[in-house]
Amino acid sequence: MLIKTLFAGFGGQGVMSMGLSLAEAAMLEGKNVTYLPAYGAEVRGGTANCTVAVSDDEIASPVASSPEFVIAMNQPSAVKFQHHIQSGGLFFLNSSLVEADIIRGDIEIVRVPANKVAEDLGSPKSANMIMLGAFIKKSGLVELQSVIESLKRILSTKKKLIEINEKALNAGYNLF
Amino acid sequence: MPKVLMDGNSAIGEAAIRAGCQCYFGYPITPQNELIEYMATHLSRRKGCVFVQAESELAAINMVYGASVVGARAMTSSSSPGISLKQEGISYLAACELPAVIVNMSRGGPGLGSIAAAQSDYFQATRGGGHGDYRTIVLAPSSVQELADLTIRAFDLADKYKIPVIILGDGVLGQMMEPVEFKQEAPAVLPVREGSLRGAKGRPSKIIKTFTSNPAELEEINWSLFRRYGLIKKQETTFETFMIDDAKLVVVAFGIAARIAKGAIRNVRAEGLKVGLLRPITLWPFPDEAVKEVVKNVNHFLVFEMNMGQMLEDVQLSLEGKGEVSFYGRPGGVIPTPSEVSRVISRLYYQKGLK
């Protein structure tokens, strides 16, 4: 089955890292996967995004016009992408920053106070990993262990960061 | 070696190093900057290898020319407008029978265009591109793995036939990440091509030049180039077919478009429509014999490209008036979706009464 996930937020929120960690985890599980960073003339404070496609079969296109899952880390992304989600899809909102009214009734909305949980943990920059942990739990797309493995590969030279990120990932996972 | 997750541009860089590329010269342009970046980090560290960020595209291609003259495996890369600037150099490389690998991660055009993925450089790539009677081998990958594999093949072909080889990708292929496996290690001893200029000790001096004042002599040079092109066509034409055995309609597409088409074909096959795919991997030489073989059993063709119909002409030429050809294209950097192409295929299928 083909599942496309779109991660969006402010530049600097770690949106690309979330996508990359998921893509690497899917690869470690032997799945077909593509990761496509959005490459536009973005403005400061605007939205950055990336798309991860995971499938058991060959992936035709890395682009998602209507992804199954969308993760919005900030208000502009929540507004911009809420209409793209496929009917029956999951919409993850960083409720610490998003106040948008979601008018879609045909999708499931998952509110994750990512920034707040990260601050409580003492590592405010790890809000993205809180969200990724929650996403893994709710979507079941890959195993938590695979994402931890992928973090170890991506951050191989930065032992301290692996620890912080793994802690945040677990905290997000255990929210649900 | 286990698979690694890599973007297409970096995968080309790694594959080039493993193919024994010694010299990379480039000038930045989106969407291929990850390749220059990769070479700056990795090639420059290797013993006996050279990385230069040139002052312009013209400088870069002429540095490739110089490196190739002395027998080094050399490479440059750019994107559409930058490739236009390199055409003079490519023509000179072709005239002097010098191997080189040139990567075009093409973007929307004409002009400065957009930085999104497009396939509108097909004509330029397959018709020589610069002035004069010449061809370049053109390889069209459709995945990150194939980008890596075809980069290695490009260096081998360039040396074997003493010809510039173009790798024609696009912005999506260059920037998307996929798992990729590198099957060969970089050579410990870098290859030096026979016949390269490394001093005339023990042999008469030799000049490599593109100017030939005697037209009869130049004619013979042209004849000899085209004899070699004939050989390349016979020996190196490559393509892939997908589900064409019972097909009533065959989609012809290359690169990223072929991949999208494959997804579309899977969709319509699930609904019982008999549709297949012919994907040219070498755009020049174009697999015209493969098209001629398909038309023996199939009457309907759909050419699908991310341009306004360029490879379409090669398909029509190959068919020599046989069969019926339709076209669907999206120019300017718009990436069609598999479901969009599925709709185009099914519409055509019913309109032509194939159901």
Image: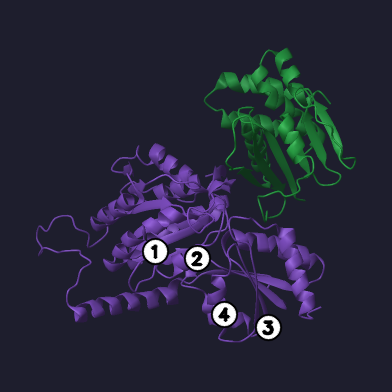
On the same chain, marks 4 and 1? The answer is: yes
Q: Quadrant of residue A124?
A: top right
On the same chain, marks 1 and 3? The answer is: yes
- Figure check: B329 above or below A58: below
Q: Quadrant of residue A173?
A: top right
Judge depth for marks 1 and 2 and give the one in front.
2
Q: Chain of mark 4?
A: B
Mark number for residue B122?
2
Tell me which label, 1 or 2, sits earlier in the chain: 2
Q: Report how far apart the C-alphas of labels 3 and 4 lie in the structure.
A: 13 Å
Please report the residue visible at 82 percent of the width from the left and 28 percent of the height from the top: A111
Mark number for residue B316?
4
Mark number for residue B157?
1
Q: Report how far apart the C-alphas of labels 2 and 3 lie in the structure.
A: 25 Å
Q: Residues within 10 Å of mark 3 (few under 14, many from 20)?
A: some
Q: Chain of mark 2?
A: B
Q: Residues within 10 Å of mark 4 (few under 14, many from 20)?
A: some
Q: Report how far apart the C-alphas of labels 1 and 2 lie in the structure.
A: 20 Å
What residue type is disc 3 on?
Asn
Instruction: Give coordinates of residue A148: x percent, y percent.
Output: 67, 29
Q: Residues within 10 Å of mark 2 (few under 14, many from 20)?
A: many
On the same chain, marks 2 and 4? The answer is: yes
Query: Which chain is assigned purple?
Result: B
Check disc 3 and report the residue beneath it: B299
